[in-house]
Image: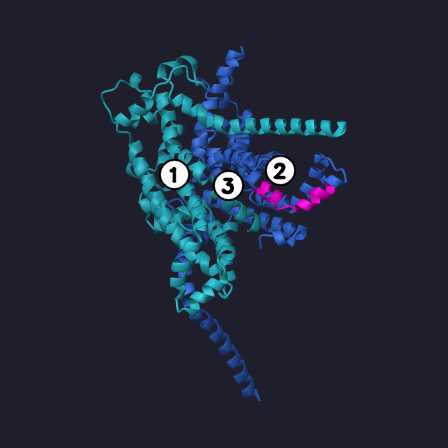
Amino acid sequence: MKQKYTSKKKSLFFNITVNILFIVICFCCIVPLLLVFSISITPEKLIAQNGYQLIPQQISFYAYTYIFKNSFSIWHSYGVTIFVTAVGTLIGLSLTSLIAYPLSRKDVKYRNYISMYLFFTMLFNGGLVPTYILITKYLHLKNNIWVLILPMLVGPWNVMLMRNFFKTGVPSAIIESAKIDGAGEFQTFLKIVVPISKPAFATVGLFVILAYWNDWWLALLYIDEQSLMPLQYTLQSILLNIQILMSNINSQTHQVTEIPSESARMALCMLAVGPIVLVYPFLQKYIVKGMTVGAVKG
Amino acid sequence: MEKIKREAVNSIAQRKRNNCLGEFRRNKVLYLMTLPAIILVFIFSYIPMFGIVMAFKDNKSAAGYFSGNWVGFQNFEFFFRSNDAARITFNTIFLNALFIISVLVVSLSLALLLNELSKRWLVKTYQSVMFFPHFLSWVIIGFLTFAFLSVDNGFINKILIALGREPVYWYSNPNYWPFILTIVNLLKNAGYYCIIYYAGITGIDQDLYEAASIDGASRFRRMISITIPSIMPLISVMVLLQIGKIFYADFGLFYYVPRETGVLFPRTDVIDTYAFRALRVLGNTGMSAAIGLFQSFVGFVLVLVSNLITKKINSDNALF
């Protein structure tokens, strides 16, 4: 009896320790973002005095109102990013599902060759320079909005993920019965397979949305024109060169000293993360589930 | 005799052709559905493979793949004779090795500890929070790092000063950076691998644990004797996948987190950032292409070798 009691106590102690450990780790995961948020709502004067602080002594949304009031190129960048993300996701998801579905069908004889064709690109690639020359010299896509969309439309990993979803989630009996009812292949896909695969579209769609929203690489290589710069690219110029923030402000009336450069920089960062922070709690379960399917069963 | 034989061969060939055509005819719509993606992949992934020839050309103007004169291995020689080759190759492999080991240790420990928690909602909450940084871009993570390490205002230096210590010039001393990059990489990637390992652990047969408990195995003992051996195949696959990519650096991490600071290059410059600079800053397409080919080739060999090893360990887990 006594022994059982102590072992229970021990187990409780263990449980509490592990929970505290996880709470600390979770705190470490979000504290960097909290710090950036705190800086963005700290008055510029206090930053100059005390540096970056986790808990602001005074709260001011001046940096945000300043960004709203002065026409920053950031709003334009927002537009570019939203356009690229929306169009890229729509087309990318369509093309990915269109190729993933036949690859999931056992009666498509050459499906494995097609899979190999896609998969090989994950193992070997031409490299940076040949791709750069292709896009700039042959396709002439430099400073064209489509260069931010086209190269990322079909990811082999996403195709494999979706194929696995179709394989496990679409019973072949349904497809058979649709065939008997006289439905064509494309009709079957559109009217039956797509509606019952909503979770697959949600998961892969999220990966695609995040990839487009977070992309800076394509802009770094192929975009020089200010009007085509996506959000992440504008942010990275500010990160690498603090002075750029000043030149981004169109307003002529302000003195340089009045610009809340420290807090505005972090406020811009928060504006870029904002949408992700807002949607993450609702969507994370799809992402976790999708990743598990892709990685463990893949 | 000869004629009959020829006819037989012909008819077999014809049937084969018919089979092939028949297959395409039967599933015409399905094959058509794959076509747009196949064409896109051909354009953006296969055409650049022909561009490999640029590594063997003297191509200052870079008008196209086949312009310029053949120079043999001169571009490679130029790269390997420089002091940079050894440094960036070492940095790439050394830092990636640090990342692989640190991520494995941390994410596996976290997954094992998650498995000891009984409340499902707690497990889910912890998982989601730890996974969150994975969805921030490297640019954003560059900002987060800067908020901590900035010399004048940085959070860490303010704490050091409050404690009566000297502030540290983080962005001026390259020797801190292998450590900093490892921490930052952990922040972004440990949660991701933790979810994969935890998913593997939850797939283990629960009867094994019950039997072990009845036999009096302690919590720790069960972890060592049941959990780890059960997910060993998954661990080996994950590690081998990463070893296969050890020659490729995560560009954003090395470009944005050190903020492209020249003083830090001795410890933070890797193959990808070097090739990028050779192309965009120096405009040396020949050498940049040579570095790219060197990377692709060694990377490809490493993937093949690691896949071969995976196959030996557990053929179900091999990639191909």
Amino acid beneath label 3: Phe
For image coordinates 59% across by 29% down, the residue present is A19
For image coordinates 52% across by 13% down, the residue present is B166
Q: Is residue B198 rendered magenta in the image?
A: yes
Dot 1: chain letter: A
How far is disc 3 from disc 2 in space, using C-alphas? 53 Å
Please say if B318 is above or below B109.
Answer: below
Residue of label 1: A220
Q: Which chain is blue?
A: B
Q: Is residue A53 rendered magenta in the image?
A: no
Along the viewing direction, whichever of B154 and B75 lies nearer the viewer? B154
Q: Which chain is cyan?
A: A
Amino acid beneath label 1: Leu
Dot 2: chain letter: B
> Can the viewer see residue A249 in this picture?
no
In this view, which residue lies farthest toward the bottom?
Answer: B1
